[in-house]
Image (tube, rainbow, N blue to C red):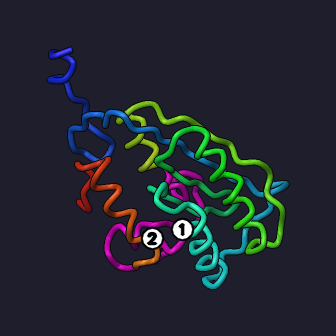
């Protein structure tokens, strides 16, 4: 309704936000078997990042490799999100040296949920009180800020679907 479009809530990052229309998004979470800790050395993290970017393609909006799980935020319909979960599992397993359980797939319901999920994914180490990587190489934050180009296309997708997210 017209009055609903005038009432805009404040997003978690401080800017008013109107939900995008006609867009499907899903969050995927891959958990380690028996909550074992994933390797966090730079070489393994960089290989995981390359595997995530290659397997996710144009659907990738954000990701975070935490100590015992990996979050991905994808712009895709449900069937595509399911296929991407299978492809990602196959791409991540050889890098981690383990077979991952099936991903948890969560529907993102509207713009406010999308921006909250975006912030949650990028800030996941802090949420779980895990010592964060000081360079944030385990996320696509360096790509969003222009400091790395591995997942550089995610910056354009974020500008497109979350136009009020800024580096402030």
Residue 71 image position (x, y, % from top left): 58, 54
> Is 96 left, or right, of 166 in this rendering?
right
What is the span of residues highlighted in magenta in the rendered image? 121-148
**Crowding at mark 1 (Cα within 10 Å: few <14, some 14-19, many 20+):** many
In front of the other: 158 or 116: 158
Q: Residue at x 55, y 54 (%)?
A: 72
Q: Answer yes or no: do the residues labelled 2 and 1 have beta carbons within 8 Å?
A: yes
Is disc 1 placed on a helix, strand or loop?
Answer: helix
Relative height, residue 91 to residue 18 (above, below):
below
| Quarter that holds the N terminus | top left
Question: Residue beneath label 1, please?
Answer: 53
Question: Residue beneath label 2, please?
Answer: 151
Q: Which mark is residue 135?
A: none
Relative height, residue 11 to residue 1 (above, below):
below
Q: Please check the rendered image and state whether residue 6 is part of the magenta-colored stretch, yes or no.
A: no
- Label the magenta part by its dominant secondary structure: loop
Residue 34 image position (x, y, % from top left): 85, 54
Of the numbered discs 2 and 1, the one sitting upstream in the chain is 1
Q: Residue at x 68, y 43 (%)?
A: 104
Residue 92 image position (x, y, % from top left): 71, 67
Q: Residue at x 47, y 72 (%)?
A: 136
> Is 168 left, or right, of 149 in this rendering?
left
Quarter of the view holding residue 111: top left
Q: Residue at x 70, y 67 (%)?
A: 91
Residue 98 image position (x, y, % from top left): 83, 66
Is disc 2 placed on a helix, strand or loop?
Answer: loop
Label 2 to label 1: alpha-carbon separation: 6 Å
């Amino acid at each position: 309704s017209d009055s609903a479009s005038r009432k805009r809530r404040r997003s978690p990052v401080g800017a008013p936000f109107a939900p995008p229309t006609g867009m499907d998004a899903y969050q995927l979470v891959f958990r380690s078997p028996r909550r074992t800790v994933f390797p966090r050395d730079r070489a393994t993290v960089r290989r995981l990042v390359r595997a995530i970017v290659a397997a996710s393609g144009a659907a990738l909006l954000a990701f975070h490799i935490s100590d015992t799980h990996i979050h991905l935020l994808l712009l895709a319909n449900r069937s595509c999100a399911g296929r991407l979960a299978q492809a990602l599992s196959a791409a991540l397993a050889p890098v981690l040296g383990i077979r991952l359980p099936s991903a948890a797939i969560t529907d993102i319901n509207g713009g406010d949920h999308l921006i909250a999920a975006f912030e949650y994914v990028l800030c996941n180490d802090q949420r779980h009180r895990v010592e964060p990587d000081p360079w944030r190489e385990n996320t696509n934050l360096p790509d969003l800020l222009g400091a790395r180009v591995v997942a550089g296309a995610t910056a354009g997708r974020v500008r497109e679907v979350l136009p009020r997210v800024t580096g402030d």
